[in-house]
């Protein structure tokens, strides 16, 4: 082998096997498309003697196929054929999220998700509701990270209402980080799906990423930032108003939640539901709803969400 190898690591052996295909049949199709041999060794796929343009094409193909088949229903051969024929280079690719230093590029999996990313890039405030696994939080967090690491914003603030156990942070054991970590773990998981744990810890230590409970927002003005409020259905109307009025210059606010999973006491209205009603007439605010069709987790999750949506329709 020569030293000019360009290598892509696919750590998930199941996905790697699907990418390669039976007897490496998919790799042979990629070779024919690129005009150079593709080598598979362990969990690595490599090409040799390729220039920058060829390397970028190789990276695009592998990233796109891996992204489509990860936790999805699409077969690798079907996805690969669409990629090589240019069928997937559509709106979804125009709104791909590339985070500097990331392990992979994130592509919207549905047209709704592509429209959602478009809103995240064209509105200062975006409110997205949707079912579990529809990508509402995942895409918002990664687009926020992209804005920070491309120096369009100076910091990323992650926040959530703390209501699950009905207790305030002061009564929970441990220091502040230990108290809040369980609530923001899904947001940290989203970050660590594209950049390493070490990078996330470094950004947290430097204050580039900040974790702040919603209750701690009073008195602050959030400028030159991108702020993600997750689980917003569990904020009260008063908390939501307080949060939105913290917005300063050069700041983006992404609000996500699932109005079917409100954990507030019955007598307390949801601030997310209230905000959707009150703020909808403001054209500058982007509002998006993702459905069961946008769920990108295990295929069974989509069916579960659809079953619940059907049941709620009957109740209504």
Image: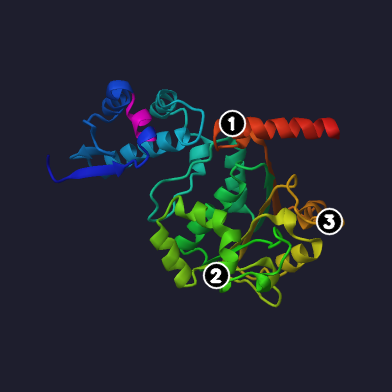
Q: Is residue 207 above or below residue 85?
A: below
Q: Nearer the viewer, residue 149 or 76?
A: 76
Asked whether, in this view, residue 304 is left or right of residue 40, the answer is right
Extent of the magenta region:
15-21
Q: Position of residue 77 (x, y in %)?
A: 40, 23
Earlier sequence position, callout 1 versus callout 3: 3
Category of crowding for the residue at label 3, using alpha-carbon neighbours closer than 10 angstroms: few (below 14), some (14–19), many (at least 20): some
Q: Which is nearer the eye, 129 or 72?
A: 72
At 57% from the left edge and 41% from the top edge, which residue is drawn? 114
Magenta includes 16?
A: yes
In what element is the residue under mark 2?
A: helix
279 lies left or right of 36: right
Q: Vertically, is 285 above or below 59?
A: below
Q: Nearer the viewer, mark 2 or mark 3?
A: 2
Q: Which residue is mark 3?
A: 269
The residue that disc 2 covers is: 177
Disc 2/disc 3 C-alpha distance (Å): 29 Å
Q: Are marks 2 and 3 in contact (CB under 8 Å)?
A: no
User: Does the magenta run of residues contain 58?
Assistant: no
Of the two numbered discs 1 and 2 on the same chain, state the one appearing first in sequence: 2
Which residue shows up at 53% across the image and 53% down it?
A: 143
Q: Residue at x 52, y 65 (%)?
A: 153
Report which quarter residue 195 is drawn in.
bottom left
Quarter of the rendering occupied by the N terminus: top left
Could you tell me how far apart the alpha carbons at marks 1 and 2 are, in whole angstroms? 34 Å
- Quarter placement of the C terminus: top right
Q: Main secondary structure of the magenta part?
A: helix
The reply to whether residue 89 is in sight is no
Q: Which mark is residue 300?
A: 1
**Which SS class for mark 3?**
loop
What kind of element bears circle 1? Answer: helix
């Amino acid at each position: 082998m020569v030293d000019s190898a360009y290598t892509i690591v696919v750590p998930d052996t199941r996905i790697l096997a699907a990418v390669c295909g039976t007897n490496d049949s998919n790799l042979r199709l990629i070779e024919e498309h690129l005009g150079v041999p593709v080598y598979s060794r362990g969990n690595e796929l490599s090409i040799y003697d390729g220039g920058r343009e060829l390397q970028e094409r190789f990276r695009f193909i592998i990233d796109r196929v891996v992204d489509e088949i990860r936790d999805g229903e699409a077969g690798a051969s079907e996805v690969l054929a669409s990629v090589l024929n240019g069928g997937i280079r559509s709106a979804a690719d125009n709104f791909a999220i590339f985070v500097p230093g990331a392990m992979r590029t994130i592509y919207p999996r549905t047209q709704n998700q592509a429209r959602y990313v478009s809103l995240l890039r064209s509105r200062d405030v975006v409110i997205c509701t949707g079912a579990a696994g529809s990508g509402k939080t995942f895409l918002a967090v990664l687009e926020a990270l992209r804005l920070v690491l491309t120096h369009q914003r100076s910091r990323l603030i992650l926040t959530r209402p703390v209501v699950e156990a009905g207790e305030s942070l002061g009564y929970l054991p441990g220091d502040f980080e230990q108290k809040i970590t369980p609530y923001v773990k899904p947001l940290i998981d989203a970050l660590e799906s594209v950049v390493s744990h070490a990078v996330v810890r470094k950004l947290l230590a430097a204050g580039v990423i900040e974790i702040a409970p919603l209750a701690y927002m009073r008195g602050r003005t959030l400028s030159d930032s991108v702020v993600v409020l997750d689980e917003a259905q569990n904020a009260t109307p008063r908390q939501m108003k307080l949060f939105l009025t913290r917005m300063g210059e050069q700041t983006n606010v992404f609000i996500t939640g699932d109005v079917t999973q409100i954990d507030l006491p019955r007598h307390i209205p949801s601030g997310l539901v209230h905000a959707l009603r009150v703020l909808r007439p403001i054209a500058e605010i982007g509002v998006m709803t993702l459905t069961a069709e946008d769920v990108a987790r295990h295929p069974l999750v989509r069916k579960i969400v659809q079953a619940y949506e059907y049941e709620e329709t009957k109740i209504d």
